[in-house]
Each structure stands twice: as structure tokens, then as C-alpha cells.
Image (tube, grey):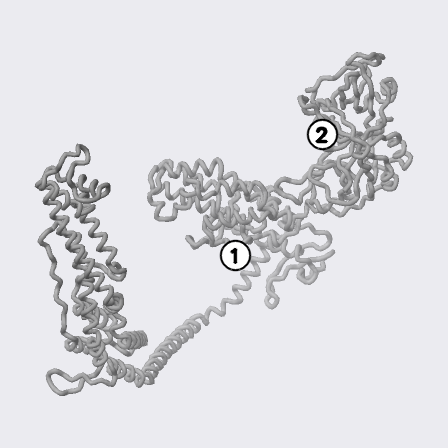
Amino acid sequence: MSGLDLKGVANQKLVISCLSEAEKEVRVGLGGLNSWKAFESLASALDAAKKTAIADAIAVARRAGYEATALLQSSISDSRFRLKAIAARWHAEHAAGPIVSCPLCEASLGKALVEQLESLRSAGDAAARTFDDNVTAIAAALDAALPAIVKQMTPEFITSEPRSKLIDEINKRFLQNDSYSKCLVRLGELVEEAIAGAPTDELPDTLVDASDLRLKPITDRIVIMERAVVISEWFESHCAAWRDWWADASDDNAILASEEDDQKHETLLEHLKRLSDALSKAEPYRKAVEALGIAWKAGKEAHDYENEIAKRVEIGKSLTPLKMLGALCEFVAGQAIGDLSGRVGELLDEFLVAERLNYKGAQLQKKSGLVVHAGLSGEICIDATLIANSSWLRAVLWCFIFAMREEAVEQIGMDEMPLVAFDDPQGTFDTYHRARWARYVASLQNSPVNVQVLLTTYEEMFLDLISFDGMTGRRALIAAPGPDRDCAVVLEGASLDRRWQKALIEKTPVAAVDYLDRARVYVEGMLKLMMRGEAPGVPGMVLGVLRSLLENLNGAGKAPWKAPVFKTLVELMGKQRAEVKYLEGSHHTTGQNFGMAEATIVEQYLRSKLGPALARAYETAREHRLLHGGMKALHAALPTAVLPEGYRTKVSEIPLTLLGRAAARTDGRDADGLVDMSEFQQHERLSVILNDHSAFRLVARTLEPVAKVGDILLTKSVGEPSNRSLVVALNNDRILARRFEISENQEDIAVLVAQAINPRQIAPPIVALKTTFSLHKIVGIIFDRSKPYIGSSAEHEIRDCGGEAAIAALTAGVLGLVEVVGKSAEPIALDHQYLVVRDAISPSAACTSLRDQPVIAEDADGNCYFKRMRIASSDQVVLESLEGSGDFPPTILDIGGTSGRALAKVWPVAGVLFELPV
């Protein structure tokens, strides 16, 4: 540990750590060396059987190599060698016995040729293959005989000298290790001395047969295999000696005699134990030194404190004469407040909505401080804090602030800094004083000086209200600091536009990347403001994390995040889009390669798609928070109106049976009125009973053309109405009959829409929270066109239906229900709704009682029509489409006669049933 200062705690901990690690490595010994583990694994894998197999494979490979070389020489010297090899191959595969003749011409072969063919046949496949193929086959056979443990070792390791390999690794572990060389110098010396006494038996290098370089792939493998066998035998012979040597060098009970004299030497573990004991005994002294250092530091700090206190005492003595100025300051402050008192009163006349308590003035009193006087009448003045409410006092405070500003401007003669900043002022107002405050601030904006107003607030509704009161200006959003910036960011679209104009002028990569980075900050800021409070750590999230959070919120299906605008925003922010990649990469190293091309793409995308989508999504989230927060405009009062008598018992007695089906013609068009009638068999007919249903009379033009004034509305008492269904609604003190709509972007907002044929008679819609309505779904209509009914727009939109007698009269003679299939009956009855029909009557009777009524008419050819019947003349009727667009021509039928265009039968349509009771 030469040169190492052990006074410091860090150095002491370093030495202790090195001692612990060194002791562990010494005790592990040779078993911790990678080369030793490899030699040990090699010796274990190459037993006697493996060594014999390797020797046999090497012998076979050498013979095969010599034979391949001889065949190569023959092929070079004999131009017909390849033909002879093929012939020998044929004889080997197709003929037995000696070769005597040619298999093609059956001519006898000469003795020399026969001997060559027999030699080639005995050589087998080697004769037919090329030399390179023979070498490859021999090498493959050697690889197959090579043990797996040898294949895992590198050729450099196999061909190395094992003793040198072990000594090198011991040197690296104990002598060349920086930790030991700096802290445990003597340990390195002891290891070096021990290495001098290590076993000296070395393994000589293996001789390589390089006589024929063409056989090098074979000879290289043979060298590795033979070297592996020799190393395993060397290790088996010398491993015990190496273990004994390391035990003598490291054992704490062993004594290593010096080669020079009989002096005893420390072993490695004895040396490490001695160092550990020395450190343990020095521990109390180290702690004492540490305590002395702490005490010295505390003493210096105390001395510094004493010097600072002395300086402050001297400063206090120097300021003692200024105490005599207290009276002068009080007099000047009192005079200033007295001068401001009148100006405060003038401003209060504009600000304060006072009834009896009036402002009387303000004084600075020695004991009480600032006192504002007020009075109820006469000259009696009272401390305003004793009787005034908080709104009155806040108004005085604002007037005092504005009066000081006016006084300062008047004394200076000009407004040197025409800027007024407000931070969350809305907490100091009620409704009346907010409007007056906003009007005064607006007057500052419109003054000759044009005072600039900077207002920050967390309540966005307050900004809307003061805008109504006359204040003007641009709006911006403030985003919290994030991981890549340590200050808040003001998000304002004009600022981003200015960055883009700068980039267009400069046209440099630096300006382009600056715009991309600002665009990223803008998008991130909008998302953070939109999703604040939806997850922990939103202010610190980056664009990719914010995108994932928005995807999760949209997929969860909760308001307001399930609105279509958020799904669109998620798609526009997909990470696969090139524009989004440019935004995300603008503050990474990849952004250094961006230029005007990428900035132009992002600017167009932000301006045309992503920017508008962000704005719509933010407004949707903002409206949701305003709606469910403090703003109560859509929270209508609970309804006080009461439904008239619904005659449920009489409604349940209406005779309704499902009789058949009226299907739209295959080649017909929507709402053309052409149907095919089919009647159910008796056993297929289903009785329908309207239990728990009520009947009311419509008295307003709000459900046209489905229902007209005077018709009877059938409602069910239980169940929530579906979107776009017809309802009877209780709203405050009114009873309404409307179409029920749910807002697209706010699912808890209901809109009650009126429908009338004449646009001038359409009643205005009513918008409120769905929970503030009492809704009853209209499931059917009974037509009553017997006499006109005139209602008043100021009255309820439904009334009592006229009693049980009215229901009985309208449903007398009702035959049952006909299911509508298709769109031919629109807009009166939609697909799979039901027409309430009466018994069929003759054409003459229909002309008398069903003028201008919806009917199902059948002509002499069996064609059926669901249309409105009008009387053209005494011998003709006109069937008009119930759809008012004029796209479908009328149908004219004759009264009487037997031709195909003659009216044969008429079913009066008494009403419509939109759904069957469950």
C-alpha cells in the first residue's frame, strides 16, 4: 500500500474491498483460472476410449490423404483417367467378379487396363470424386471424430503452451490488476516470488507436416486433435504438482523457504490476514481522526457565524439614527392615503354596487394602521371591517390599487410602463363587481396610452365572462415545465407562426429544427393541458407517452375521451406517420439531420390536420370540464309540471292483434308507398296488450309529419328512451312533445328538437343535462283527424286526451297491426314498425269518411298502396305519397268499375305503433 493515504474513509474502504476480493481469489486458487478449467474439462472428456478413437481417425485420414494425392497424380498424367474411374465405378455397382471385357462392345480388355480398372474399383468413391471433394470428405470425417469439448476451444488455445498459459493468467489476475497493483503492492511481490517456484515442465510444440500444402485442411485438423490429446495427458501428469505448488504458496499454515537462505517467508493468505488485522486495530484511531475533522469544521462554522453576527450588530448601530424618521414616514404615508381617499371614493362610485353602506374615507392611524371608514347615513363613520361584507372590502381594495396607479401617472406626467398584470383576480369578485371591474380595465385598454393588460387565471370561464364585459386580447395557454425544459411554456399559435416565418426567411437547417422543436413543444403542451389530472406525472410526459395515454383514455370508452374527435386525434398522432416522427425526433440526435423539407411537411400537417384536431379535442375536453364543474347553465331545475291523466286501464284494452305484413316492393323506391300485403295464418297472429302505457293529446306542431295536432300519443311509463326517439318530456313547468337527441360530443347533454312542416312554426330546441328531464318514450300514435284542434304556443304541448270515451271512439273497429317491412311507409312508419288498421271498408264509404287520411288501398289487380287519399272527383281518388319531397308521383284510381285501375278495398290507418311492448 505504498503511497496510499489511509486517512480518508474512501481509501480505507477501497483497501478493505481489495483485501476481501484478493482473499476470495487466493482461496479459489487455480480453479478460478479459465485456462485451468479448460485443461481440466479437456482431460475429463478425453478418456482412453476417446483417445483411441481419435488416433484411429487420424490414421485413416492420413491414408486417405495419401490415396487422394495418388489419384490426383494419376488424373494429371492420364488424360483418360476420368473415363476409367467412371468405368470402374460402373463395374463396382453393376458387375461382380473380375473385369474382363467392355460392357458396351463386349471386346476383351488388355491386362494393363484391367489392372488399372481393378485398382480404381478398389479405391471406391474416391476415384470418381475430384481431389477437393476427397479432401473435404476426409476433413468432414475428422470433424465427426473430434470431441465437442475440443470444437468449443479456439485453435490458438489448443496450440498454446499450457504452463505459459497458466502463468500468464496468474500474472493478469494478481500482478497486472490495477486494484491490487495500487493497494496491495506486497501481494504482487509475493505472487511473483511464488511463480518462480512453479512447476517447470513445459509441453513442446507439436510438429506440423507441411510437406504437401494441398492436404493442409487435413493436417491442420490432425494437429489440433493430436495437440488436444497431448495437452490432456500433460494435465493428467502435472495437475497434482500444480495444486501442491499453489497450496504451498497460499496456505496460511505453510512456510515457503527462500532459495537464497533459510529465512521464512509469508504465504499469500498470511499476508492478507496480517493486513486485515492491522486495519481492524487502526479503526478506533480512524474514528477519532474523523471526529476531530467534524469538530474542526463545526468550530470554523461557529466562528463564521460569530463574525456575521458582529457585522450585523454594527450595521444595526449605524441605522439607529434612521429610527427618528419613523414619525416623518407615518406623516407622509398618512398624507398620501388622505390624498388618495377622494380618488378611491370616485372609483368606488364606478365599482361598488352599494345600497346603504357608503364609503366615507380612509386614514392611516398610528395604532390601528390603515382604517377604512363607512357609514349607513349622516356623518357617522364606522370602521368598515366591522360591518362590511367581503365583497364591499374587496371592491375598496381594487379601487385603492387603481387610485395609486392613477396618482402615480398624474404626478409623473406620463405612464412610463403601460402594463398591468393580474394573477387569478376572479377570487375577489362576485357577479356584479366582476362586470364593473372588467369595464374599468377595458377603459384602460382603450385609453390614449393603450395600457397593455396581462391576465393569468386557471378558470377559463372567467375569461369568457370578462370578454362579454368588454375586455379584449389574445388568449394563450400555459404548459407546465417538462423533462426537457425548466420553465413554463406559453402556447400561442401566433408565436409558432412567427417561428415559421423566420424559418422561411432564413431557410437554414438551424431555423428549421428550431421550428420543429417549437411545434413539438406546442403539441405536447396542448396534450398536457387537455389531459391534466388524468394520470400521475402528466406535466413531465413527452410526446410518445402522451400519445399512449390518449390512446388508453379513448379506448376506455369514458366521457369525454370516447368522443369521435379524440379517435381522430389518436389516428393523426400515430407513431408510424412521418410528420409525427419529425416532431418526436426534433430534440433527439436524429433531429440534427432535419432541414426545411421536414419542417415544411410538419407545418402543412400541423396547419391543415393536426392543429385543428388538437383545437377541437381541447375544446371538447374544456367544455366537458366546464359543464361538470362550476358552470350551471345547463343544470335545469327539477321539473314541476305534472302529466295529465293517462288512462292506462283504457289503453290496455285497445284491441291489437298482429295480422300480417306490408312489405316494400322489390323494385320500389324509398317512401314510394307501394307495398305487398301478406296476411298471417290464424295460429301466427299475436295479441298485443299495452300494459303500463298512457295516452295524451298533442296540441302543438312539434312532431310533424309523424303526428299532427289533435293526435293521441301513446307513451310507456318505464324505460329510458333511445337516441332520436319521440318523447314526452317534463321540463321545469312545461310538458313537451319532442324528438330526443343526444349531443355528439357530450353524451349527457340532451337536446329536445321540435319538427314542423312549416319552418316558421318550428319551436326552438331545448338543451340541458339529460338528468334534468323527466322523459317518457312515445311508442305509438292514434290519428284523430275528425276535427281541427287549435292549441296555443304558450301552453303545454300535450293535454288530456279527452277521457276514456275519446280513446274508445278512436279505437272502435280497430282490426289490428300490420308490420312494415322496408322503407315504403316512410316517414310515418319505419322499417319493422307497425300500422294500426281498422276493418276494410268499401270505396264509397272511404270517400265519405277518409278524405285526406292515410289509408292502405288495394286496386282491382291486387296492388296495395300506403298513401294519403284525396277525392279528385265523384268517380276518382288520388293517392298521394306521405313523403313531402315531391319525388314520388300520385296514383289515380277509379271509384267503381272492374278495370285494374279501379279502387277495390280500403283499410283505414288508425295510427302507428313504433315498437311492441316487452
Residue lying farthest to the right in this orientation: 805
Q: Is residue 8 visible?
A: no
Query: Left or right: 787 with respect to 184?
Result: right
In which quadrant is the N terminus drawn? Answer: bottom left
Residue toward you, 537 or 135: 135
Residue toward you, 147 or 623: 147
Residue toward you, 385 or 703: 703
User: What is the three-letter code of the residue carrying label 2?
Assistant: Val
Q: Position of residue 79 (x, y in %)?
A: 10, 37
Query: Left or right: 690 with respect to 325?
Result: right
Q: Position of residue 483 (x, y in %)?
A: 43, 54
Disc 1 vs disc 2: Cβ atoms closer than 8 Å?
Answer: no
Q: Which residue is drawn at 44% across and 47% down?
A: 521
Q: How crowded is mark 2: few (under 14 residues within 10 Å), some or many (20 or more)?
A: many
Residue 683 quadrant = top right
Q: Which tag, 1 or 2, sits closer to the chain's start?
A: 1
Query: Left or right: 559 with respect to 659?
Result: left
Q: In this view, does 880 lie above or below 639?
A: above
User: What is the three-letter code of the residue carrying label 1?
Assistant: Pro
| Residue bearing the label numbered 1 | 536
Q: Residue at x 75, y 31 (%)?
A: 819
Q: Where is residue 392 in the image (x, y as percent from the top left)?
A: 66, 55
Q: In this view, does 726 lie above or below 64?
A: above
| Residue bearing the label numbered 2 | 821
In which quadrant is the C terminus drawn? Answer: top right
The label number, if any, that marks residue 16 in the structure image: none
Q: Where is residue 478 in the image (x, y as percent from the top left)?
A: 50, 49
Judged by depth in the image, the label closer to the viewer, 1 or 2, is: 2
**SS at mark 1 in the image:** loop
